[in-house]
Image (cartoon, grey):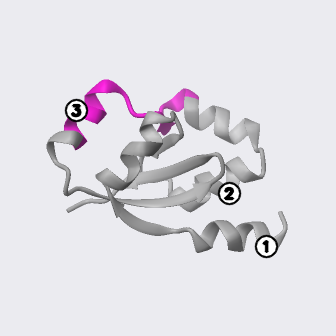
Amino acid sequence: MEGSTEEGIRATLGVVRWEDLRGHVERDGLILVDPPLEVLEVALALAEDRVDIVGRWLEEGRIHKPDAATLAAVDASPDVSFQMVICQPWVVAQMLAN
């Protein structure tokens, strides 16, 4: 991958609250990452179109779209924070431990 792509993705890395991610859920653009994977690792695999590894993570449930139970849990705790990165057209996020 070109360094500029990685640098561009890395530049979007940040910590946000759930309310900042809600709009991405509504447009079906949020991908959640379960530990021990990291958001940057997943975003780079998406950007590189690494279908093999991304497919495996999806099959294993290590990356996923938020389901109803997850949405209910985070809606009930709006102060929860997420590490996130933008990898167009997705936002890749992971809940941070309190």
**Cα–Cα gap, marks 2 and 1:** 12 Å
In this view of the protein, which residue sits in the foreground, 34 or 75? 75
Which numbered disc flags the more N-terminal residue, 2 or 1?
A: 1
Q: Is residue 3 above or below residue 80?
A: below
x then y, percent, for residue 55: 66, 32
For the view shown, which residue lies furthest in the right direction? 2
**In the displayed structure image, the side of residue 42 where residue 98 appears, left or right:** left
Q: Which element carries disc 1, helix, strand or loop? A: helix
Question: Residue at (24%, 43%) from the top-left corner?
Answer: 74
The N terminus - image quarter = bottom right
Disc 3 is placed on an element classified as helix
Tags 1 and 3 touching, CB below 8 Å: no
Question: From what the image shows, is residue 81 above or below residue 74?
Answer: below
The amino acid type of the residue labelled 2 equals: Leu
- Mark sitting earlier along the chain (2/3): 2
Dot 2 corresponds to which residue? 44
